[in-house]
Amino acid sequence: MIIPRKQMQKIVEELEDTIQKNINIMDETGCIIASSDMSRIGTYHSGAQQVISQKLDELVICSQDQYAGAKNGINLPIIIEDEIVGVVGITGEKEEVQILGKIIQKMTKILIMDSYQNNQKKITENMKNNFVFTWLFATEDSGETEESMNLRGQLLGIDINLDRVVVVLGIVNKKQNEKIREAEVEQKLFDRIIKEIRRYLKQDSQHLVFQIGTKLVIFFHSSKTAEVFNVVKQITESVEKQYDCIVYCGIGTGGTNRIEIRRSYREADTACNLAMRLKNRRIKVYSDADIELLLENISKHDREMFVKRVFKDCQEGEIIRWVQLLRCYSENNGSITKTAEDCFIHKNTLQYRLTKLKEMTGYDPRNIKESIPLYIAMLIYEFDHVV
């Protein structure tokens, strides 16, 4: 095992804070790779070399002249899996440091193992990220066959032949009300959210969670969109409560092979973008977003002209008020009582406003046929503006 120098310096600093003594960590060659005394890093410690070459349980140095590059103190081997991977030394008088020696030796071993395991986790996580990226984006000329993908997946504990539904999450910072960017310190927030989602889904190891760009992607081991929707709703509520953020979700349709999984990802990403853009529903299922998808394929100029034709000579502020009223009215399925309650107005006031809307636009929202242009104009306006 190669001891990473940066992590060893952190360990030295942690230990020094605990025992208030100078500490050195030497590698398997006797070179000091971490020390409380920065001037000693990179120098040779012949006492440590003696511990390694003779496999000593400890080496007490009583004088600086005994071993080149060494000071008085105690030096103990760091043994991991029956192999001496380095030496830890504590500077000081024998009576002071010998009692601490065994404790520091054990603490150093624990910290090194913890650092090693964390590094291994990071390596495995990077391998999984690379695998998922290939799974979703690799071109035909990349040389990745179904057989090689299957094998790589097996080695990483990922079965690529299962039914899956892909979900894409967009995270918005509530305080700044803007999309979180990876370039900012917000990466730590992403990491915590990923950890929380994995904890929530840990009952099935084939539920996969990754970060792709500035979004999170979940590969649900399921073929039922409705089932995924319910789980996603619980996850987003939990994440929003804990991390003071807004989570927008897009859910694709189910798939099994690579082509279907890629289609599910594209659908989920499109649905997520629509959710973030429209903000009328935080979770959007791609298969339920027919009208919104149609609007996305119409040019912005044509969308703007349609809104102007429907709302005629209305000023911007008036359009916003009519759109908000129409949204509330449609969400309450045309119920005068419920809409009036949600708008905090009397039912007669609501009836008056609906009549006024009819006079200004020529379309009556209470008439099914005439309400269609109003509903589409509302969707377009929400599509292009924050209401």
Image (cartoon, helix red, strand yellow):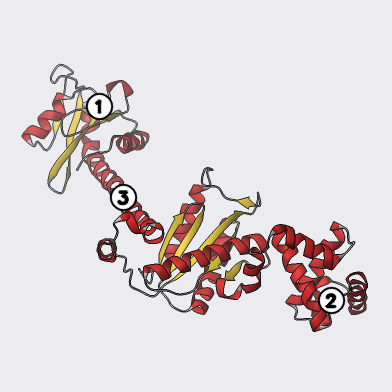
Amino acid at the residue labelled 1: Thr
Q: Which type of secondary structure does the marked residue at label 2 adopt?
A: helix
Task: Give coordinates of residue 21: x percent, y percent.
Answer: 31, 29
Amino acid at the residue labelled 2: Ala
Instruction: Indicate which label's residue lies in the foreground, 2 or 1.
Output: 2
Task: Give coordinates of residue 273: x percent, y percent.
Answer: 59, 61
Instruction: Please give left or right for residue 347 compared with residue 369 in the image.
Output: right
Tell me the distance, in whole angstroms, between the alpha carbons under discs 2 and 1: 78 Å
First in sequence, mark 1 or 3: give its number.
1
Residue 340's disc is: 2
Q: Is residue 202 above or below residue 130?
A: below
Mark 1 Cα-neighbour bin, 10 Å: few <14, some 14–19, many ≥20: some
First in sequence, mark 2 or 1: give its number.
1
Residue beneath the point at 67% across and 66% down: 295
Residue 386 visible in the snapshot:
no
Tell me the distance, in whole angstroms, between the alpha carbons under discs 1 and 3: 35 Å
Residue 175 visible in the snapshot:
yes
Residue beneath the point at 16% across and 22% down: 62
Q: Is residue 240 above or below residue 2?
A: below
Instruction: Please give left or right for residue 102 compared with residue 159 in the image.
Output: left
Q: Is residue 38 above or below residue 336?
A: above
Residue 123's disc is: 3
Residue beneath the point at 29% across and 34% down: 5
